[in-house]
Image (cartoon, helix red, strand yellow):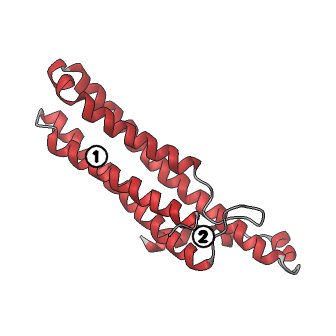
Amino acid sequence: MVEKVEGFYEKIVGDSGTLRNLLSKIPGLSGYMERGRRREADQLLRDTITGRLEQARLAYSAIYQTVSRDIIMAMDYAERMGRADNLMMGLVGKIKDAPVGYAGFFSAIKVDEEDLARLYAFDEQMLNHTDQVQAEVDALSKVVNEGGDLNQPLSALTAALLEANEIFNSRQEVLNGIQ
């Protein structure tokens, strides 16, 4: 998974054209351009993470609708399912609306190289948690389709979402200079 995270940055760097090469020879501009490419890579990565979470949420919405059709199941699980849905929506919103991970020249948030390495580690964890959330949604779907007990898969999904939120909040603390 580390290769995937580093690959986003390498993809952005590899897209440097002739104009960028010329501009990079201007004193002081190359570092600024490097930060710009890092911001682009961070945005691409966050777009990928939110895209995957939105796909998981669409699948979860279908499950939620299926459960809602059975009045007994709806009464038993509505609150817990609504909480998981809110956690997923909140996580997607936080990731979409977060400041870009590598700050620009005029930005109030500055990220040094050491913090940047930590951010990439958080991003790798977020990709892993996104996969975990999708796996838990798939497990919940299977149990719903089989008419089983939803307690364990709902607990597992909620735990995965809480952990993903915690990881993302830790990432924001690095950006804000708290950690």
Q: Which residue is mark 2?
A: 9
In this rendering, the count of numbered labels is 2
Residue occupying the far front of the picture: 178
Relative to 81, is 5 above or below? below
Q: Is residue 110 left or right of residue 164?
A: right
Residue type, numbered disc 2: Tyr
Closer to us: mark 2 or mark 1?
1
Between the residue at mark 2 and the residue at mark 1, the CA separation in whole angstroms equals 31 Å
Residue 171 in picture, x, y percent from top left: 49, 63
Relative to 3, is 78 above or below? above
Q: Quadrant of the N terminus?
A: bottom left
Q: Dot 2, how many residues are within 10 Å of its Cα: few (below 14), some (14-19), or many (20+)?
A: some
Dot placed on the residue nearer the N-terminal end, 2 or 1: 2
Q: Quadrant of residue 16?
A: bottom right
Q: State the residue at coordinates (44%, 49%).
A: 52
Q: Which residue is mark 1?
A: 158
Q: Quadrant of residue 170?
A: bottom left
Secondary structure, mark 1, is helix
Q: State the residue at coordinates (36%, 58%).
A: 129
Q: Dot 1, how many residues are within 10 Å of its Cα: few (below 14), some (14-19), or many (20+)?
A: many
Observer-nearest residue: 146 or 156?
156
Q: State the residue at coordinates (48%, 54%).
A: 49
